[in-house]
Amino acid sequence: MPKIEGIIAYPVTPFTADDQIDVAALRGLVDRLVSTGVHAIAPLGSTGESAYLDEREFDAVVDTTVATVAGRVPVIVGVSDLTTSGTIRRARYAETAGADAVMVLPVSYWKLSEREIVQHFTRVAEAVGLPIMAYNNPATSGVDMKPELLVSMFETIDNLTMVKESTGDLNRMKALAELSGGRLPYYNGSNPLVLDALTHGAAGWCTAAPCLAATPCLELYSAVRQGESDRAKDLYQLLKPLLEFIVAGGLPTTVKAGLDLRRMPVGDPRPPLLPLESGQRETLRTLLEAIEGQEPPVS
């Protein structure tokens, strides 16, 4: 499989006015992200509103994304579902469609035990041949996978090969490195933590921010990798207000509003999510204007 590192961009899922998947808008967004130079595309994460899609819609997003990327960068499909069987169905579909990896966030109405988490990942891993990125985000899933558990699964489940850590706790990432002897690649999923995470060895940054400001995100990653610490700090300070805003306001809501402000409408988020309020929209406009000129204009 292709090496997965760098800026892993998370597109939103566009909807038409009558609440259908806007395939043309999704195709345009994904193509634009790849064209800016991001290193991978990850549809159907939290930003992509995957929890609010039915299976037909899920499949349409997978097909459109894989076809649009056309092998230019790796595609990592979020396949999480409330049930193990549903997650397996989605993972198998992603594999058949041509995805390069799948991302699994354990989600459950009931709090899962470690035994149940291990069984969930084991069954998904046995069902597909793709590499699996274990996604830890207890703020959204209600399930917290500690570093010891993640490293144990990495060592015992052959195709669980990487971790996206979104708690915003740098010590978690350090523990993943220490407990695995540096063998387990981990990726930062907490936007405000990005500078510290990359500086301390994260293999990449999983983020929706490139939808709105791709160039400074890419330049930040490059500056860290080249040891240009002062430049990396300057780029982080440029991006920080936007990163904090989109996280606080909810990624689908804020990113969709930002794309609309950038003259690339992708529709509203799906209820129960609501569009960004007018005052917050103006705040977002100001934040984007502060970054203006840092990435190519929208065609």
Image: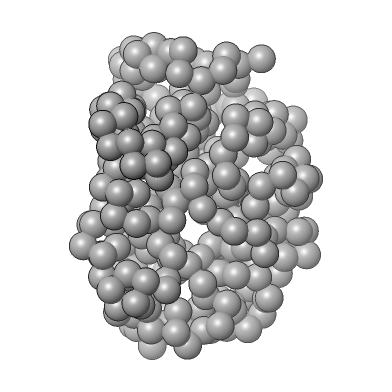
| Residue 9 % position (x, y) | 53, 42
Which residue: 49% across, 47% down? Answer: 6
- Quarter occupied by residue 264: top right
Q: Nearer the viewer, residue 75 or 53?
A: 75
Question: In the image, what residue occupies the spot 56% across and 83% down?
Answer: 158
| Number of residue marks | 0
Q: Nearer the viewer, residue 16 or 184?
A: 184
Image quadrant containing the C terminus: top right
Q: Position of residue 199 (x, y in %)?
A: 30, 49
Horizontal arrangement in the rendering, residue 195 relative to residue 48 (left or right): left
- Residue 175 placement, left or right of 202: left
* Picture coordinates of residue 226, whole percent (x, y): 40, 41
Picture quadrant of residue 277: top left
Quarter of the image for the N terminus: give it: bottom right
Residue at x-position 50% and y-position 29%: 214
Indicate the quadrant where residue 223 lies. top left
